[in-house]
Image (cartoon, grey):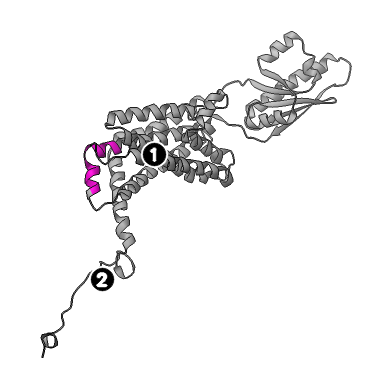
Amino acid sequence: MSIEETTAPTTRTGPSDRKEPAGKGGPGGRRTAGDERLSPVRELSRTMILSVLRDKGTIFFLLIFPILFLLLFGTLFKSDGTPHIKVAQIGEVQVLDSLTKDQREQLSKAATITKVSSESTALEKVRKGDYDALVEQDGGTVVLRYSAADAVKGASARATLNAILEQANLAATGKPATYTLKASQVEDRSVKPIQYLTPGLMGWAIASSAVFSTALTLVTLRRKKILQRMRLSPIRAWEVVAARIAMTMVMALTQTALFLLVATLPYFGLQLTGNWWLVVPMVMCGTLSLMSLGLLIGSVTKTEESAGGLAQLLVLPMSFLSGSFFSLDGAPDWVQVISYLMPLRYLVTGSEDVLSRGGGLVDVLPTMGGMLAFTAVVTALTLRFFKWNDT
């Protein structure tokens, strides 16, 4: 009888026979391959987020400091005092054309009257806020159409024109009233200060945290040889990148929530439109595009000082040229052309559209697609310069 026939069969315990603790992994307590690969990303993300939360200086500069800017600028520009209105005159308006020189000088203190030829163009500018009102004459009726964006300027336009009409009617002593005023509102599409301050300062805060922290982190990891050790460890490169993206996304969305919470307070009065939630994917796409710039800076610099200096040289001009601190409507053409090359402009204008100007998915999809395309191009360029170590 052979050995194989007399020896009792032995039981081998392989990986497939081991039992995982209950409540972990897939069905039957077994951990799946997807769980194994996601665990390093989850743990790295958690570690990075905790490291930020433990640093009080980082919390102040990334979360509290930008909110202080919103509180300051929102308070300063909340009220502009007595408004000076801009009125477009369509064709001949006898009551205005017959004003004397002294009357015109008096009127110029309260309003600027500009003669335009196209009613449709003037009406569009009223909608956008370039003009506060337009006026034209229809027989004995002076027609005034004003923007509903600013109730104070609308009331000022009506009061100013009413005063002029009363003087004209009083001049016709003993006669029936020659002129009457017909006033109506124009759809509100102009921008109040809080409407561009909120997305502008929010974009600046997200750009600062995404570009600076990404660039400095990459340089620090390379200089301390941590990148080189990671390359030799079981952790894959994409897991480190994914964890960093997750941490930056959490920070950006937290900044967004804080800005909206403050801006929508009754004191500031930001009115959110029905599609305001689109700001979330908008911020996510914008964060990716700005992070790609941070990765590029971190790839071409060797020290934290040079990375911080280059990031500052990029973020500060980009913030001014992208409309973060003031509207670019009155900026020179060359400034607006340059701003179209910057991802921050699209984050700011796209956020403004969905937060307070009624923009929908169709309006922001091209913007988000453009930011993702920018991310792909800059990331491809980063791979050209990326190094695991300084040698």
State which quadrant residue 15 falls in: bottom left
- Is 130 magenta? The answer is no
Secondary structure at badge 1 equals: helix
In the depicted view, which residue is nearer to us: 316 or 325? 316
Q: In the image, is 261 to the left or to the right of 6?
A: right
State which quadrant residue 157 falls in: top right
Name which residue lies at 31% across and 31% down. 307
Q: In the image, is 131 to the left or to the right of 268?
A: right
Q: Which mark is residue 16?
A: 2
Q: What is the spatial separation of the Cα atoms under label 2 and label 1, in whole angstroms?
A: 44 Å
In the rendered image, is residue 313 in sight? yes
Classify the position of the N terminus by image quarter: bottom left
Q: Which residue lies furthest to the top in this view?
A: 102
Q: Residue 381 carries which label?
A: 1
In the depicted view, which residue is nearer to us: 136 or 149? 136
Q: Residue furthest bottom?
A: 1
Q: In the image, is 113 to the left or to the right of 53?
A: right
Question: Disc 2 marks which amino acid?
Answer: Ser
Q: Residue 231 carries which label?
A: none
Task: Specify the segment rendered in magenta.
Answer: 217-231
Q: Main secondary structure of the magenta part?
A: helix
Question: Disc 1 marks which amino acid?
Answer: Leu
